[in-house]
């Protein structure tokens, strides 16, 4: 019963999928892939006309290659208007628009969206969390909602 409820919950709240734009190597590893910084793009699933670009560290080596390493918490984000902005439903402050696992079990990187109604601006925040202890490191970007 719990598995069914979890499955239905996942279907009800689709998140954006990232497309890798490019990467640079930062540390050479003798075995396994190098440590690197990746740049990914994703479209906001509820706001047509907005694309976000996320850069973040990916740990290499044998453990990184096997998906067992924990990636660093640092990330940078830049969201841009790439077309006419159209809202696809009601926006909730702090709504998660992107989430990716950054360790085997306990750590994720996520992007949440806020609507600053007073300034007619969309605000996106990227941060990393862990079940027991998250990180205060974060980055923010904002897009004024204007006619295209």
Image (cartoon, grey):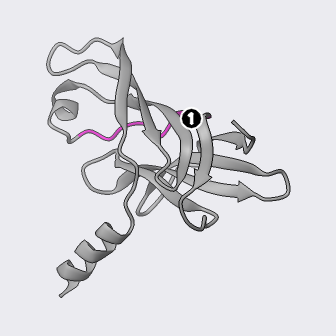
Q: Residue furthest right?
A: 118
In this view, the residue in front, 117 or 127, is 117
Residue 51: within the magenta?
no
Range covered by the magenta-colored residues: 69-80
Q: In the figure, residue 17 lies in which quadrant? A: top left
Please report the residue visible at 62 percent of the width from the left and 41 percent of the height from the top: 84
Q: Is residue 129 shown above or below 70? A: below
Q: Is residue 108 left or right of residue 92?
A: left
Q: Residue furthest bottom?
A: 1
Please report the residue visible at 32 percent of the width from the left and 74 percent of the height from the top: 9
**Secondary structure beneath label 1:** strand
Residue 35 lies, in percent from the top left, at 32, 21
Quickly name the residue at label 1: 77
Q: Is residue 53 left or right of residue 107?
A: right
Q: Is residue 11 shown above or below 138? A: below
Tell me how many marks there are: 1
Quarter of the figure with the N terminus: bottom left
Please report the residue visible at 26 percent of the width from the left and 39 percent of the height from the top: 69
Please report the residue visible at 40 percent of the width from the left and 49 percent of the height from the top: 16
Q: In the figure, residue 143 lies in which quadrant? A: top right
Q: Is residue 8 shown above or below 126? A: below
Q: In the figure, residue 50 lies in which quadrant? A: top right
Quarter of the figure with the C terminus: top right
Q: Residues within 10 Å of mark 1 (few under 14, many from 20)?
A: many
Q: Is residue 7 shown above or below 67? A: below
């Amino acid at each position: 019963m719990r598995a069914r409820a979890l499955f239905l919950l996942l279907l009800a709240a689709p998140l954006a999928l990232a497309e890798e734009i490019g990467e640079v190597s930062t540390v050479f590893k003798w075995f396994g892939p190098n440590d690197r910084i990746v740049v990914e793009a994703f479209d906001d699933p509820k706001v047509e006309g907005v694309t976000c670009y996320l850069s973040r560290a990916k740990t290499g080596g044998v453990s990184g290659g096997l998906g067992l390493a924990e990636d660093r918490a640092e990330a940078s984000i830049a969201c841009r208007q790439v077309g006419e902005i159209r809202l696809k439903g009601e926006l909730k402050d702090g709504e998660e628009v992107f989430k990716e696992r950054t360790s085997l079990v306990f750590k994720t990187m996520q992007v949440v969206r806020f609507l600053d109604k007073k300034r007619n601006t969309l605000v996106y925040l990227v941060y990393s969390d862990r079940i027991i202890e998250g990180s205060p490191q974060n980055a923010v970007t904002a897009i004024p909602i204007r006619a295209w």
